[in-house]
Image (tube, rainbow, N blue to C red):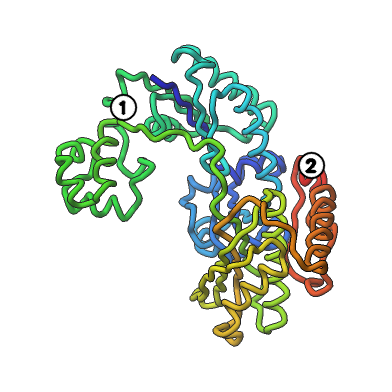
C-alpha cells in the first residue's frame, strides 16, 4: 500500500511577505493589492491573509476595500510572483531529495510518494520532520507548512488541512475511515460549494449522512463524480500522482492602478502582457494555438473570448495581435479598462520546423536571444518601444535580486 505525503504552506503569500520583512511579522496583512509599497490598493481582492488578519475576519477572495472596512489596520501588499516562485522552488528542491515521485499540486502545496524512501509510517513521520526542519532553514521560520501522511491523496490532503498552522497528522490505513468521518465535507478536495449545496438537498451535510446515501443515488445525481463521492466518504481514492504533468495553458492578467481609457493604452499594455506570456512559453519550450483574451471594466463587468489558430503562436507580438483581434471590436473605452488578461493554450512542445521565410526565422532567433538575456537579468532587461510607460511592474524578492531569480 502506498504512503503519500501532502505538504501545504500556511497563509502562503502572506507568510512569505512576513518572512521577507520582519516589520510585518505579527501584524494583520493581506496580499492582493497592486499599489506601491505598504498600504497597497483597494482595487483588488485578497489572495491570502495572514493568520492575524484571518483572526479579524479577513478572508480569501474578499475585496480589499471590504477587508479594510472590517480590519482598518490591515496592511495590503502587492503580489510578488518572483518572490513566491523562489520559495516554491525551494520547497520542490527539498522534497525532490526524499520523494519517490512528486506532484506539484499548486504554488504552495505538493504531494510526495514516499513508499520506498520511508518504508513505513514511522519512517514517513521522521521524513516529515526532516522536511519540516529543512524548510525552516531554507525558507525561514515565518513560512510554516502543514503536513499530512496517509495511504492516498484524498486523505493525505484532509490530514494536512486538519491541523493548521504547522501541523503534522499521520493517518494509518486502519484509521482512515474513522478519520475521514471527522472532517467537514467542504474540506474534501473535489467537493466545491456547488456540489456541497447539491448534497445538502439530498440530506448529506456530513460524512456520516453522505455514507447513508447509496452509491446508485449518487451516480444518478452526479454521474461519474457520484462514484467518486461514494468512495471519498469512506476515505477511498486511487488517484495517481500527476508526475511531470505539462502545463495546460500559460497566461497573465493585470489590474491597473488607474483605468485605461484609450485604445493606445489598452494596446500597449496588452502587448506588454503578451510579451510576459511569450517569455514563459519560450522558457518552457512550447508554442500554442489558442488565445483567450478578456478585459474587466471599472464597473467589474467584463468581455472577451477565444480563438483557435492554425499557425503556432510563440512570440509576444503574435500573441498580442491575436488577442487584439478578439477584443478590438467590442471594447468600450468610456467604461474604463480595469484589468486585461491574456492566456495561450493548446500548447505543444516547440518542434515546429523553422519558417520558410527568412525574415520570420531571423525574428525568432532574435527573440530567443532576448529571452536568454531576460532570464539572466530580469524581465525589464529589454522592452519594446511601443510598451514604454506601461504599468506592469516587476518586483524584487526579499531573498534575491530579480536577475538572480531569472537565471
Q: Residue furthest front?
A: 356
Please indicate whether residue 318 sits to the left or right of residue 359 in the image.
Answer: left
Q: Which type of secondary structure does the marked residue at label 2 adopt? A: loop
The label number, if any, that marks residue 179 in the structure image: 1
Along the line of sight, the residue nearer the viewer: 164 or 130: 130
The label number, if any, that marks residue 160 in the structure image: none
Identify the image quadrant of the N terminus.
top left
User: Do the numbered discs 1 and 2 sit on residues whose CB atoms are within 8 Å?
Assistant: no
Along the line of sight, the residue nearer the viewer: 361 or 119: 361
Q: Which type of secondary structure does the marked residue at label 1 adopt? A: helix
Identify residue for label 2. 400
Counting from the top left corner in percent of width and height, residue 372 is at 82, 50
Give the residue at x 48% y 13%.
119
Give the residue at x 56% y 55%.
249
Q: Disc 1 versus disc 2: distance between alpha carbons? A: 42 Å
Counting from the top left corner in percent of width and height, residue 219 is at 20, 47
Instruction: Please say if 188 is above or below 4.
Output: below
Instruction: Please say if 348 is above or below 262.
Output: above
Please indicate whether residue 287 sits to the left or right of residue 227 in the image.
Answer: right
Please indicate whether residue 194 sits to the left or right of residue 369 in the image.
Answer: left
Give the residue at x 68% y 52%.
80
Along the line of sight, the residue nearer the viewer: 97 or 21: 97
Amino acid at each position: 500500500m502506498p504512503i503519500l505525503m501532502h505538504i501545504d504552506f500556511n497563509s502562503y503569500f502572506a507568510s512569505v511577505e512576513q518572512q521577507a520583512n520582519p516589520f510585518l511579522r505579527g501584524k494583520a496583512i493581506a496580499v492582493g493589492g497592486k499599489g506601491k509599497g505598504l498600504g497597497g490598493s483597494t482595487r483588488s481582492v485578497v489572495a491570502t491573509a495572514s493568520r492575524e488578519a484571518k483572526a479579524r475576519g479577513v478572508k480569501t477572495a474578499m475585496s480589499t476595500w471590504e477587508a479594510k472596512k472590517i480590519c482598518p489596520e490591515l496592511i495590503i501588499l502587492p503580489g510578488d510572483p518572483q518572490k513566491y516562485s523562489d520559495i516554491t522552488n525551494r520547497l520542490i528542491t527539498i522534497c525532490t531529495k526524499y520523494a519517490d515521485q512528486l506532484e506539484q499540486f499548486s504554488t504552495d502545496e505538493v504531494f510526495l510518494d514516499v513508499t520506498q524512501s520511508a518504508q513505513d509510517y514511522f519512517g514517513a513521520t521522521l521524513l516529515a520532520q526532516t522536511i519540516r526542519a529543512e524548510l525552516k532553514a531554507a525558507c525561514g521560520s515565518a513560512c510554516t507548512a502543514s503536513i499530512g501522511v496517509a495511504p492516498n491523496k484524498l486523505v493525505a490532503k484532509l490530514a494536512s488541512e486538519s491541523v493548521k498552522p504547522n501541523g503534522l497528522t499521520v493517518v494509518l490505513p486502519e484509521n482512515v475511515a474513522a478519520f475521514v468521518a471527522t472532517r467537514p465535507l467542504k474540506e474534501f478536495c473535489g467537493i466545491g460549494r456547488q456540489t456541497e449545496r447539491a448534497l445538502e438537498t439530498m440530506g448529506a451535510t456530513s460524512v456520516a449522512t453522505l455514507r447513508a446515501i447509496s452509491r446508485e443515488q449518487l451516480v444518478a445525481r452526479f454521474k461519474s463524480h457520484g462514484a467518486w463521492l461514494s468512495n471519498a466518504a469512506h476515505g477511498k481514492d486511487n488517484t495517481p500522482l500527476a508526475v511531470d504533468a505539462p502545463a495546460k495553458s500559460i497566461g497573465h492578467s493585470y489590474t491597473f492602478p488607474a483605468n485605461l481609457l484609450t485604445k493606445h493604452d489598452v494596446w500597449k499594455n496588452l502587448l506588454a502582457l503578451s510579451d510576459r506570456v511569450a517569455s514563459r512559453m519560450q522558457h518552457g519550450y512550447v508554442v500554442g494555438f489558442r488565445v483567450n483574451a478578456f478585459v474587466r471594466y471599472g464597473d467589474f463587468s467584463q468581455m472577451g473570448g477565444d480563438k483557435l489558430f492554425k499557425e503556432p503562436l510563440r512570440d509576444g507580438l503574435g500573441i498580442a495581435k491575436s488577442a487584439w483581434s478578439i477584443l478590438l471590436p467590442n471594447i468600450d473605452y468610456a467604461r474604463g479598462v480595469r484589468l486585461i488578461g491574456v492566456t495561450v493554450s493548446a500548447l505543444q512542445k516547440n518542434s515546429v520546423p523553422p519558417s520558410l521565410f527568412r525574415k520570420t526565422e531571423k525574428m525568432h532567433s532574435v527573440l530567443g536571444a532576448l529571452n536568454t538575456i531576460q532570464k539572466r537579468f530580469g524581465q525589464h532587461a529589454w522592452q519594446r518601444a511601443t510598451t514604454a510607460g506601461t504599468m506592469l511592474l516587476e518586483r524584487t524578492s526579499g531573498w534575491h535580486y530579480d536577475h538572480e531569480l531569472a537565471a
